[in-house]
Image: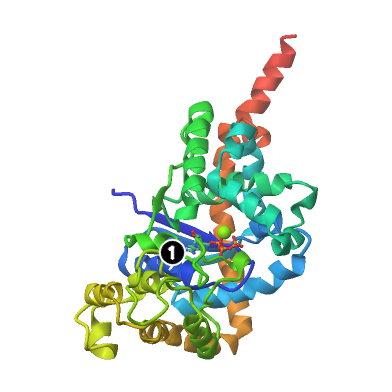
């Protein structure tokens, strides 16, 4: 029988989810949910991981659990088809992390480019230094979070992990752990495959300030759940092309965030709907490059496209917000279901590592024999 896929991804409850999450990962998850015949799909709220750099701000994590859960439901993840759970409520994951720590060197962890840039970001920006309190050094928990991610992925024997590009080093690290584990202890764990968005601009959507990545920690986000009015203000003050001062100046597309967002969101039908004087995105870009096309016009076009996608999400969220006990129930049931799966993998891991002493009858028999012969 053909083995079906197991899909898994998570998000840190460090804030509400934004359109970077949406194009980088959430939209892809909903597409998989609706199109694929998979064995299981897990989506989880990575609160234990969020605490590794927010350990001094437990309220931030606590307050964002439901925000993220509401974002999940409002983008269309369906609890009947997806198991949604909370990471810290599955202690099996912590136990796996501890065993995997033996399989990774400190030098290897230091080479992780995402961890490196996150440490730099937190070390040098005043605001996040206060927030993350890395002034006294990098917490061991933060430094080792890629190992805990390996535990999250392997506990569910995930085969597909749909994420943004920043997660590539984590998947590589996970695969190394899987290979070491299976070589030393036996073939228990499964190597996952990363699933990046097909459209390369969606793999790392820049912030509205034009900085490399839209990120909760950088405050350069358009949130899924913000008001249309807030989105309007943000789009109108978005970073474009600093050399495009007068409307007739030739404009640049590369690094122009409005065009990057258009690349991520714009579909052919948007032209006949909102901007019929242009045939397609190429024609719009050509005009901008030549000069004579103002920023306000492209921003208004982008705003319409964004709202078309975000308004239904925002409306669904308002409905779910009226029934918080239901959202909590979804999380509780999902967590129970997920825990049973993780417990099964942990028991296989413990068996392979030969630490399942009292589940293994041979152990007792062997020990009796050993001591009777002494
Ligand atoms: P934090 O600043 O707390 O790390 P974040 O905004 O980076 O938050 P995460 O919870 O770390 O968000 O990321 C969740 C998922 O969303 C990951 O799969 C990540 O790759 C994806 N993602 C986050 N930001 C972007 C982005 N700007 N573009 C594409 N994908 C993104
Ligand atoms: Mg992140």
Image position, residue 310 (x, y; %): 44, 83
- Ligand 2 resides in the quarter of the picture at bottom right
Badge 1 marks a residue whose secondary structure is helix
Up-down relation of residue 159 to residue 317 (above or below): above
Tell which of 141 and 332 is nearer to you.
141
Residue 156 can be seen, yes or no = yes
Q: Is residue 188 left or right of residue 359?
A: left
* Residue at image coords 51%, 50%: 153
Within 10 Å of disc 1 (Cα), the crowding (few <14, some 14-19, many 20+) is many
In the rendering, at what x and y percent does residue 192 appear?
43, 47
Residue 214 x, y percent position in the rendering: 52, 66
| In this rendering, position of residue 107 left or right of residue 7 | right
Q: Give the side of residue 250 with respect to residue 360, left or right.
A: left
Q: Label 1 CB, ligand 1: below 8 Å?
A: yes
Tell me residue 51's x, y (percent).
70, 58
Disc 1 target residue = 24
Residue placed at 64% from the left, 34% from the top? 106
Q: Answer above or below: position of 322 versus 125.
A: below
Comparing 159 with 264, the one in front is 264
């Amino acid at each position: 029988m053909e083995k079906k896929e197991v899909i898994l991804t998570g998000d840190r409850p460090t804030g509400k989810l934004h359109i970077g999450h949406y194009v980088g990962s959430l939209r892809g998850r909903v597409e998989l949910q609706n199109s694929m015949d998979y064995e299981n799909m897990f989506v989880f709220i990575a609160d234990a991981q969020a605490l590794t750099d927010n350990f001094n701000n437990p309220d931030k994590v606590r307050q964002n659990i439901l925000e993220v859960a509401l974002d999940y439901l409002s983008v269309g993840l369906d609890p009947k088809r997806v198991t949604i759970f909370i990471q810290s409520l599955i202690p099996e994951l912590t136990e796996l992390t501890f065993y995997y720590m033996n399989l990774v060197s400190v030098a290897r962890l230091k080479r992780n480019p995402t961890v490196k840039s996150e440490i730099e970001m937190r070390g040098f920006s005043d605001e996040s230094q206060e927030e993350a309190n890395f002034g006294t050094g990098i917490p061991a928990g933060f430094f080792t979070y890629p190992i805990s991610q390996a535990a999250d992925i392997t506990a569910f024997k995930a085969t597909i992990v749909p994420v943004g590009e920043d997660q590539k080093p984590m998947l590589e690290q996970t695969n190394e752990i899987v290979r070491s584990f299976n070589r030393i202890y036996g073939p228990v764990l499964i190597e996952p495959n990363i699933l990046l968005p097909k459209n390369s601009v969606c793999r790392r959507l820049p912030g509205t300030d034009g900085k490399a990545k839209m990120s909760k920690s950088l405050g350069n986000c358009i949130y899924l759940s913000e008001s249309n009015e807030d989105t309007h203000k943000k789009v109108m003050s978005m970073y474009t092309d600093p050399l495009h001062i007068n409307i007739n100046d030739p404009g640049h597309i590369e690094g122009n965030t409005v065009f990057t967002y258009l690349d991520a969101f714009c579909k052919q039908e948007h032209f006949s709907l909102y901007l019929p004087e242009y045939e397609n995105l190429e024609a719009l870009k050509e005009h901008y490059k030549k000069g004579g096309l103002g920023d306000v016009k492209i921003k208004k076009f982008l705003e319409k496209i964004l709202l078309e996608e975000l308004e239904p999400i925002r409306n669904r969220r308002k409905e779910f917000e009226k029934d918080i006990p239901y959202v909590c129930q979804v999380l509780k049931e999902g967590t129970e279901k997920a825990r049973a799966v993780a417990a099964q993998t942990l028991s296989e891991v413990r068996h392979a590592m030969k630490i399942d002493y009292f589940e293994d009858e041979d152990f007792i028999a062997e020990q009796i024999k050993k001591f009777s012969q002494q």
